[in-house]
Every structure is written in structure tokens, then in C-alpha cells.
Image (cartoon, helix red, strand yellow):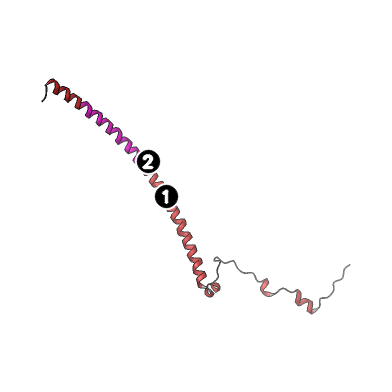
Amino acid sequence: MTTVKPIKKSQAKKTATPKAATEVKAPSLMPISFKDFSKDPVKGMLFLVLIAIGYLYVDGKMNYTSQIETQAKKIQMLEVRIENLGNQLRRSDSTLAAAESKIAVLQQLGKIK
């Protein structure tokens, strides 16, 4: 059997953990505490500005992507419309050419003046 030696008072103080080390801090939502902010408000404000700029950057990117998708749909619709108008223009050009040739033939025959 092993025997346990009594600890002297001087040894007990050396091995005891300090009270501050045993305290557990509650997790904070912000990485800067109010004490730190009150000591150096410039760093705190820079942190808040950095968060705001990051948010605005992400929001802007999301807004631009939605605009790009909307404009892509609109461009496709307009391309179809341009194609239809081009077909109608070709038909009207061919109809005009046919009418001009008929008028020219009738003028040569003397049917119209």
C-alpha cells in the first residue's frame, strides 16, 4: 500500500490554481467587449465599419446577380422579337419588289401611265 504524505501549507499555495484562471467567460456575440470599445473606440468603430462594408458588398453582389438574370430573360425575349421583325421585313421587301416589277411591266405595255 502506498501512503499519502500530508501537504505543507507552503506547497498547497503553490499548487492551487488562481481564481481568475478557473473562471469561465461566457461566449460573447461580438469579438470586442464594451470595455475594449470604451478604451479604444477607434478600433471598435473600424470593426463595425468593416462589418457594414462586408454586408453591403454581399448585398450588392446578390442584387447584381438578380439583375443579370432578369436582363438575360429580357434579352432573349427581345432577340425573338427582332427575329420576327426581320422575317416580316424580308416578306414586305419581296412583296414590294414583286409589286414594282408588275407596275414596270404594265407601264411598258402601256396599260398605265
Crowdedness near tag 1: few (<14), some (14–19) or many (≥20) residues, C-alpha within 10 Å: few
Mark pair 1, 2: CA separation: 16 Å
Residue that extends furthest to the top in the rendered view of this protein: 109
Residue that extends furthest to the front in the rendered view of this protein: 108
SS of the residue at dot 1?
helix
Q: Residue at x 48, y 65 (%)?
A: 49
Q: Quadrant of residue 4?
A: bottom right
Q: Residue at x 79, y 76 (%)?
A: 11
Q: Earlier in the sequence, mark 1 or mark 2?
A: 1
Q: Residue at x 70, y 74 (%)?
A: 18
Crowdedness near tag 2: few (<14), some (14–19) or many (≥20) residues, C-alpha within 10 Å: few
* Percent x, y of residue 107: 14, 23
The three-letter code of the residue at mark 2 reads Gln
The magenta span reads: 75-98
Which of 69/28 is in front? Answer: 69
Is residue 77 left or right of 102 when viewed as pictured?
Answer: right
* Percent x, y of residue 65: 43, 50
Question: In terms of secondary structure, what is the magenta stretch mainly?
Answer: helix
Residue 90's label in the rendered image is: none
The three-letter code of the residue at mark 1 reads Ser
* Percent x, y of residue 83: 33, 36
Figure quadrant of the C terminus: top left
Which of 29/41 is in front? Answer: 41
Which of 40/29 is in front? Answer: 40
The residue identified by callout 1 is 66
Does the stretch in magenta take in 94? yes
The residue identified by callout 2 is 76
Q: Image height check: is 89 above or below 68?
A: above
Q: Quadrant of residue 34?
A: bottom right
